Image (cartoon, helix red, strand yellow):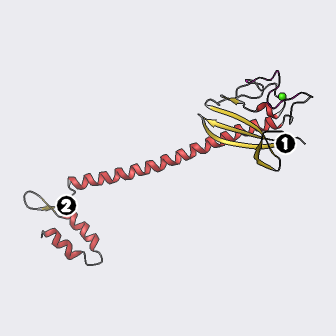
Amino acid sequence: MSLVVRRIRQTIGNPSGLRRVAALAAATRRQPNGRWRAGFTLVEAALSTVIVAVMFVAALNTVGAARVAQYKAVLVGRGRLYAEALLTEILQQSYQEPGATYVFGREAGESDTSRAAYDDVDDYHGWTESPLVAKDGTALPNSTNWSRTVTVEWVDPLDPQQVSGTETGAKRITVVAAFRGMPQATVVAVRTAN
Ligand SMILES: [Ca+2]
């Protein structure tokens, strides 16, 4: 049993044992000439470097995760604004095409690529755009990589979850805003005939 181990065993039994062990370990390094000296060995220094590195990486991961969460929250907020803006525009239109002749979807003269002539909510069914534009076709600033899609369906007015293939007097409008193809926000409204 070495001198160090013996002295550690004698020391560890009393209340200040651990502190004394640490002091003893630091104070007792055998040099080639047989003397004892204070200091760290190369292995101890290397170990402390590894410990610091591991803690540093853990701290960086925490900061990185917080940044990612913040970025995602910003995307969701912008997506909601974009989706709600288009939904508001749709809800300002008639339930169905004014006049005697109408279909579900776009009537004659209503384009697949411009909303300028849209005048009823189901004109918007199947609408998709990227980048984003206002109703008159003006591009929304800084909307690169964003897209909006619209789905309009007849639903049971008493249970809007139930989609119908025929006229029910209620149309459910769903707008999805996506960034780089990843949906960030979905807004839904039901427009009734009366
Ligand atoms: Ca129309």
Is disc 1 surrounded by few (<14), some (14 to 19) or many (20+) residues within 10 Å?
A: some
Q: Amino acid at mark 1?
A: Thr
**Residue 57 in the image, given as x and y percentages of width and height:** 40, 49
Q: Is residue 190 highlighted in magenta? A: no
| Residue sitting at x 22%, y 54% | 43
Q: Residue furthest bottom?
A: 14
Q: Are marks 1 and 2 in contact (CB under 8 Å)?
A: no
**Which badge, 1 or 2, comes first in the chain's sequence?**
2
Note whether ligand 1 is within 8 Å of mark 1: no
Q: Amino acid at mark 2?
A: Ala
Q: Dot 2: within a 10 Å radius of its alpha carbon, few (fewer than 14), some, or many (20 or more) residues?
A: some
- Residue pointed to by mark 2: 38
Give residue 71's position: percent from left, percent from top: 57, 42
Residue 108 position within the rendered picture, expressed as x and y whole percent measured from the top left: 83, 22
The image quarter in which residue 142 lies = top right
Tell me: residue 134, above or below residue 187.
above
Q: Residue at x 22, y 75 (%)?
A: 11
Horizontally, residue 26 falls left or right of residue 180, namely left
In the rendered structure, the answer to whether residue 14 lies left or right of residue 134 reads left
Residue in the foreground of this view, choosing between 11 and 156:
156
* Element type where label 1 sits in the image: loop
Residue found at x 16% / y 68% = 4
Magenta span = 101-112
Distance of label 1 from label 2 (alpha carbons): 89 Å
Ligand 1 placement by image quarter: top right
The residue that label 1 is drawn on is: 168
Q: Quadrant of the C terminus?
A: top right
Determine the main secondary structure of the stretch shown in magenta: loop
Query: Which residue is more in the foreground, 97 or 65?
Result: 97
Residue 124 location, quadrant: top right
Quarter of image, res 147:
top right
Mark 1 or mark 2: which is in front? Answer: 1
